[in-house]
Image (cartoon, rainbow, N blue to C red):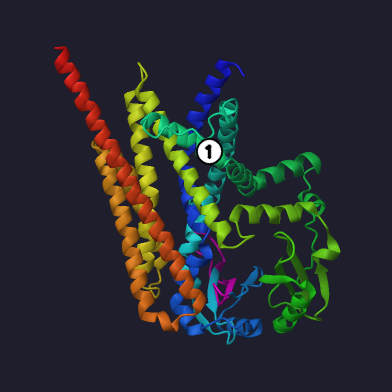
Amino acid sequence: MKNQTIKSLTEAHAWIGVIISTVLFVVFIAGSFSLFRDNISSWERAELAKQVGEFSGAISYDKAIETITHQYDVDTDHGFFMLEPSAHNPFIEVYFATHLEAPDPISGEDHQDQHLLLSPTSGKILADANHFEFATFLYELHYDLGFGKFGLYVVGVVTLFFFVAILSGICIHWRKLAKNFFQYRAHSRKDSKLDAHNLIGTMGLPMHLMYAFTGLVFNLVIIYQISYAVLLYGGDQTALLQAAGFNEPKITAAQQPMAMTGVDALRIRAVNTFENADINLVEITHFGDKNAVVSFTAKSNDTFSNLNEVQYSLFNQAQIYLTQDNYDNAVRAGLATIASLHFGDFAGYGMRIAFLLLALATAYVIVTGNLMWIAKRSKQRHYNAAKVRFVKHLSAGAFTGVLLAIANGFLATALIESSYSEKLTLIKYCVFASFAFALVSTQLITRLLSYTKTLLGLTALSFISSIVVILVALVCQFNQLPWQTRLDHGIVIALLALFAFICSQAIKQLNHAEHASRATISSECQLTSQTH
């Protein structure tokens, strides 16, 4: 490859990295926590787990449905979903919609979404699940930055450029990839950053490619779907979905009310039908209608991440759909595989820890990439000082701000009573305000290095404070908690301790950089005085 081509690729690689660095850093840090989403959710819901006790495996969906129909006016035009209880989440988690007497004056919606946690055996409503959704919020930060559909597409575009950055990086270092693979010049500040960036980027290449590709599929799949429907199926999206294996029977509502009973008996049939699979979702279509359909979705234990589904008519208990009978389609199986690869849920904690370390290493690659861009631009003869300063301060504010925001989010989750109706809203405000504070304040500060250390110190203090609060609560209720909930507390504490340690190590690195900078300035001053 010609030198000019390499130079152009290097320039493009650097600029792409700087432009997407802030969003990409948020995605990877939030994704690191999301790998342990079940554990964080279990910690949040510990006080409810005390009421339920150890999960025995006994489940009564019929009692849960009876409770809901007596207390809520369920909107039958919307979906009715129930998540299967598990050791991490020993509750029946229900999503449905209720009628509103009048449309909402702001949104115009004629229904209100409900999200409840119920006892798996008695069907008693334990709490509004929206009070225990910090883990879900962290997951949302990972895939849409907390901004819904707009954020989803922003992350999708950033992921696309991430993919381009990976490919350009491979082209740049291809000739010296084997020769310099283990090269790390620790005594040179400039070279150590470059070597670390290249080494970690190369070692993490399979994961980077996997995350870039799967992220594109998740965030921009609607664009591909529309394109294929227009180009190959003449705009018929239904035909596209049927060709892809999404060919469930379409049953319309009979407009005749019927009691929703018999789900427990159908669940037993579904378990026997799946044989070696764990049910994770129950959906009732046309809830309250004679033509109601109950769907059971399960994850297979004997094949890699394959999802199975069976559907029954609630009126006559007849099976009307089974995945094995309707398709053996690579598209659906492929999507399930992609999802498991992305979330690392196809193996145990060893795999998740490996994904966590690789995600943190990628975050370090992002940081070193920005530092090298700043250092290179600062040494150019006619560089734009204002531009370099903005990127420098933005990088410091964004990278420290993400950690500070999440740390304060954990602390707020631990301190705010779950009975407070606006708990999740307050937590979100705390997270976004912390991030905005870091972004704005770093642009206004002059002594950036010292201020960055202060922000990292506050972040470490917030993580440690969260650990203390969690430990105190754990000790007070240890004997009342199920075994799995205790274990999840330990995992959350370990996760917070890891990030507190990372912050402390970052402060040490900044101290070394500050001392080295002072030593350089001092030697330059001595050289100048000797010259004169």
Determine the secondary structure under disc 1: helix
Question: Is residue 452 depicted above or below 58 in this figure?
Answer: above
Task: Tell me where residue 213 sits by quadrant.
Answer: top right
Q: Residue at x 25, y 39 (%)?
A: 445
Q: Is residue 109 left or right of residue 188?
A: right
Q: Is residue 140 left or right of residue 437?
A: right
Residue topped by disc 1: 201
Residue 101 falls inside the magenta stretch: yes
- Asked whether residue 409 appears in the rendered view, the answer is yes
Name the chief secondary structure element in magenta. loop
Quadrant showing the C terminus:
top left
Q: Position of residue 30 (x, y in %)?
A: 47, 53
Q: Is residue 516 left or right of residue 176?
A: left
As for residue 382 lying within the magenta part, the answer is no
- Could you say where residue 524 lies in the image, as x and y percent from the top left? 22, 22
Q: Please state which of residues 121 and 277 is positioned toward the viewer in this rendering.
A: 277
Nearer to the camera, 130 or 258: 130
- How many numbered circles does the render carry? 1
Magenta residues span 87-112
